Image (tube, grey):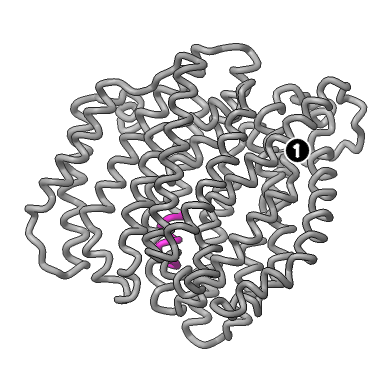
């Protein structure tokens, strides 16, 4: 757990600095500076471009996670791995651009009635796809070299600072919304340039334009993993973004904006999971290559425990302050209350299963997870079509919750059945019960009905009790070590 613990702690720290900055934009500025329709436009630009980026990658990011240990060789620029990745990305980008160009009239026709504002800025998606594709390729490459924090710094810190600046410019009427969107796209693209520079400074931006070091068996594995990973990467993005896209076409872009703000508060719970999973992918892949099941079992168990402690603490903080959050936000955002609840619980479930995704995704059964994710994507689409027309925002959130619960359960039982690894024990029950008991007792804390008073004092009391009990009970030796 050494390198995972070190880089996940750093990654979590940078991520939460980013969260703090993200709160300034999404929590403090967006609801009061931008109209829900304008927030929806920024969300849809990112949703469509992220989906197209995963298609354009042609599954190569899965190759980085699964097969990079077989390329690792600094003398040959890792057997031309970066060259191969950029070559495949260029081919995928060309295919994606042709497809998107042909589909653009259909997408606009579907959006013109309820999301007309979005159609005005659709063309910016193409630039976002290019920069996000390069960033994704370089990020996965650098992560496999055990450098996972630079990308987090640029995405969570630099990008958010820039977004704060341009939002303030818009607030003071120094730019109009068209200029805001242009600067928004530039801000999202800048981390790509910064990450490129980091890799260059590390001496790893070496594009060896040859495939001669890749034998036939390894190339066959690359093709196989890429084909399967296309389904994994695309479906994962569908799962994360289809609710916003479908909301915009069924309920309108304003509903997407309200959904985005509520989703932001709920997704804060899963922030510590991202840096841990990123670095765990590289370490677990190495362990599978060495058939070191004991190390994988140890990582799985310890990550589940520490992530459950963090996730339970954050879910508790969210739920005890839920009424105060809606006292702060403009009144129309309270229509998304169940978004916050369902997505919050979904984020907690993801945290509570640690690095289960990495365990399957880097194993010889990686294709099973890919097939399961296709099923999950279909379930998300189906349940969204079923629930959004009836329940609107709440329906989209419940569809995501139901689908994710099914998928997480599948991952858990598959790992238990195939690898005889089961991360939960009495400590897991103890943490969950502690969260529920404190959630119940928090109801008896007096309320002033002033959010700027209630949120700090309730959070402080519950935090002291929760953290104190976790520390004194020594439920997680790793957490105590970090705290000490």
> What residue lies at 66% left-to-right and 67% top-to-bottom?
186
Camera-nearest residue between 357 and 102? 102
Residue 447 placement, left or right of 108? left
Residue 266 placement, left or right of 123? left
Residue 473 placement, left or right of 227? left
- Residue 40 in magenta stretch: no
Q: Is residue 169 above or below residue 439?
A: below
Q: Is residue 478 above or below residue 239?
A: above
The total number of labels drawn is 1
- Residue furthest out toward the bottom: 173
What secondary structure is the stretch in magenta mostly built from? Answer: helix
Camera-nearest residue between 198 and 385? 385
Query: Are there few (<14), some (14-19), or many (20+) residues within 10 Å of tag 1?
Result: few
> What residue lies at 50% left-to-right and 66% top-to-bottom?
247
Q: Is residue 472 above or below residue 20?
A: above
Q: Position of residue 191 (x, y in %)?
A: 64, 56
Q: Look at the numbered disc 1 and give the secondary structure of its residue.
A: loop
Residue 110 placement, left or right of 9? right
Q: Which residues are magenta?
A: 18-26
Question: Which quarter of the image is occupied by the C terminus?
Answer: top left
Q: Is residue 49 above or below residue 431?
A: below
Circle 1 is placed at which residue position? 203
């Amino acid at each position: 757990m050494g390198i995972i613990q070190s880089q996940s702690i750093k990654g979590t720290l940078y991520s939460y600095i980013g969260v703090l900055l993200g709160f300034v934009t999404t929590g403090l500025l967006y609801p009061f500076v931008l109209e829900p329709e304008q927030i929806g436009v920024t969300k849809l630009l990112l949703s469509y471009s992220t989906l197209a980026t995963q298609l354009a990658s042609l599954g190569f990011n899965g190759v980085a996670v699964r097969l990079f240990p077989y390329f690792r060789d600094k003398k040959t620029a890792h057997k031309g791995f970066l060259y191969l990745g950029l070559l495949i990305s260029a081919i995928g980008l060309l295919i994606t651009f042709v497809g998107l160009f042909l589909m653009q009239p259909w997408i606009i026709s579907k959006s013109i009635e309820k999301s007309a504002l979005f159609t005005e800025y659709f063309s910016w998606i193409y630039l976002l796809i290019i920069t996000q594709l390069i960033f994704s390729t370089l990020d996965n490459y650098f992560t496999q070299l055990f450098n996972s924090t630079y990308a987090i710094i640029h995405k969570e810190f630099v990008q958010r600072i820039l977004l704060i600046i341009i939002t303030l410019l818009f607030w003071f009427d120094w730019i109009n919304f068209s200029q805001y969107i242009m600067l928004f796209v530039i801000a999202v693209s800048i981390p790509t340039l910064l990450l490129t520079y980091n890799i260059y400074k590390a001496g790893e931006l070496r594009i060896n334009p040859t495939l001669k070091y890749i034998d036939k068996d390894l190339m066959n594995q690359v093709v196989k993993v890429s084909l399967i990973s296309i389904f994994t990467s695309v479906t994962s993005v569908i799962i994360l973004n289809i609710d916003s896209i479908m909301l915009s076409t069924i309920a309108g872009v304003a509903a997407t904006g309200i959904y985005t703000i509520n989703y932001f508060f709920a997704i804060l719970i899963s922030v510590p999971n991202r840096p841990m999973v990123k670095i765990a992918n590289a370490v677990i892949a190495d362990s599978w290559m060495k058939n070191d099941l004991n190390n994988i079992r140890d990582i799985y168990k310890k990550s589940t425990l520490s992530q459950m402690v963090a996730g339970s603490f954050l879910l508790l903080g969210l739920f005890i302050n839920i009424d105060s959050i809606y006292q702060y936000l403009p009144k129309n955002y309270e229509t998304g209350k169940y978004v916050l609840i369902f997505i919050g619980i979904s984020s907690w479930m993801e945290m509570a299963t640690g690095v289960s995704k990495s365990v399957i995704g880097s194993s010889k059964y990686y294709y099973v997870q890919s097939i399961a994710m296709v099923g999950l994507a279909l379930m998300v689409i189906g349940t969204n079509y079923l629930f959004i027309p009836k329940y609107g925002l709440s329906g989209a959130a419940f569809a995501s919750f139901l689908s994710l619960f099914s998928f997480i359960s599948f991952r858990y039982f598959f790992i238990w059945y195939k690898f005889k690894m089961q991360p939960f024990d009495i400590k897991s029950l103890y943490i969950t019960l502690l969260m529920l008991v404190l959630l119940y007792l928090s109801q008896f804390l007096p309320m002033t009905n002033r959010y700027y008073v209630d949120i700090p004092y309730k959070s402080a009391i519950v935090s002291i009790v929760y953290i104190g009990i976790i520390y004194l009970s020594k439920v997680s030796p790793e957490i105590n070590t970090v705290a000490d």
